[in-house]
Amino acid sequence: MSKRILLSSPHMGGNEQKYINDAFEQNWIAPLGENVTEFEKTVREYVQVDHSLALGSGTFAIHLALIECGVTEGDIVFCSSLTFCATSNPILYQNAKPVFIDSDNDTWNMSPYALRKALEKYDELGKLPKAVLVVNLYGQSAKMDEIKALCEKFNVKLIEDAAESLGSEYKGRKSGSFGDYGIFSFNGNKIITTSGGGMLVSNNKENVEHALFLSTQARDQAVHYQHSELGYNYRLSNISAGIGRGQMEVLEDRVDRRREIFDTYYKELDHIDGINFQPELSNTKSNRWLTALTIDSEQVGIESSELIRQLQENNIEARPVWKPMHLQPLYEEYDYIAENNDNAKALFENGVCLPSGSNMTDEELNTVISTIKSIIGNK
Ligand SMILES: *Cc1c(COP(=O)(O)O)cnc(C)c1O
């Protein structure tokens, strides 16, 4: 059988090994060192944010962003529902309460209309959230102007989960630079990887310094080990950061290739009635981390789940769109503010993510396309 075609797998650039070797030669294996410092600098200069903190995961970065927003027990945090659980789980780490917000169909991300409804509702209850946590799904930026304006109006902090959107742009500015805090992930399947890692970015010097303090076990200024605050062991290792340095050198190439893959799928499949690709909002540039589309089963003659199953049989890894958090058993008890219809639910039920790795060959891409055409044609 032919080699399995994966959804998104690590794609090294070439210099990663060199930076790792540097760390070995300097015996800077752990924990910090030049790779960490340089990796942080490269990322913050790239996204044009003043401060950056390299961490062991994107999840850690979200957790620290919530802490820096002052989120504690019983507080409310508004959060995109259509996302991966890593976005919302840290809200529960803080014993705070998520309120999930629906997507709009233009971006698949947080609907400003639903956000306004939620802010008005919770304002009336006298329980405004401590933060709004907005996700840029599959690389497409949310409607940042509208979302920022609402956060400013209600005086609520904004955290941008840009785990999937490093390299994307919104009105000429880099994704991840819009909130009070931005976070990135360098997990193995993301657009670039450190084998596992994340970053917190912000223009707020004091809070990033405090996040650094918390991420290294909150050690007070004392020779003996003294602690007044609850800390964490959340820093990125100097070895992983070496991989990140090499990966940042090829980020633009990775974005170009992912966009090319998207464009090819689009050209070959968009004319089919009932197939609709995730849109790209005008004035934005998605990194197209994953090519995602929806299938109208009546028009196309096949359910999205059946298409995924048949691709699987052909050794092609396709996935459903994230299952929204408001439909997860873990989050059953929490409030959800839909637009009018439940868009997030419909996107989940009809959505498919196609193999999109930047190291995919043209031949593999053509195999996926012809397999989809033959599955659909057989209906
Ligand atoms: C991957 C991802 C994260 C977190 O990433 P880790 O580095 O795996 O902790 C957060 N949010 C979204 C939307 C993601 O896709």
Image: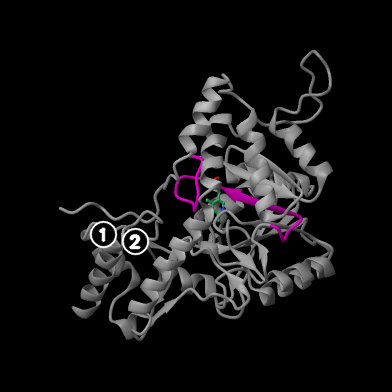
Q: For the point 72% across and 61% down, which residue is it? A: 178
Q: What SS does tag 2 mark?
A: loop
Is residue 82 at least partly visible in the picture? no
- Of 375 and 302, the residue lying toward us: 375
Residue behind mark 1: 312
> In the picture, residue 168 is in which quadrant?
bottom right
Is residue 59 at least partly visible in the picture? yes
Residue behind mark 2: 318
Residue 286 percent location from the top left of the image: 55, 67
Q: CA distance from mark 2 to mark 1?
A: 7 Å
- Of 167 and 157, the residue lying toward us: 167
Whether residues under marks 2 and 1 lie with C-beta atoms below 8 angstroms apart, the answer is yes
Residue 140 percent location from the top left of the image: 56, 67
Amino acid of disc 1: Gln
- Of 122 and 130, the residue lying toward us: 130
According to the image, what is the colour scheme of the structure?
one colour
Q: Residues within 10 Å of mark 2 (few under 14, many from 20)?
A: many
For the record, the magenta segment spans 177-195
Verify whether residue 192 appears in magenta.
Answer: yes
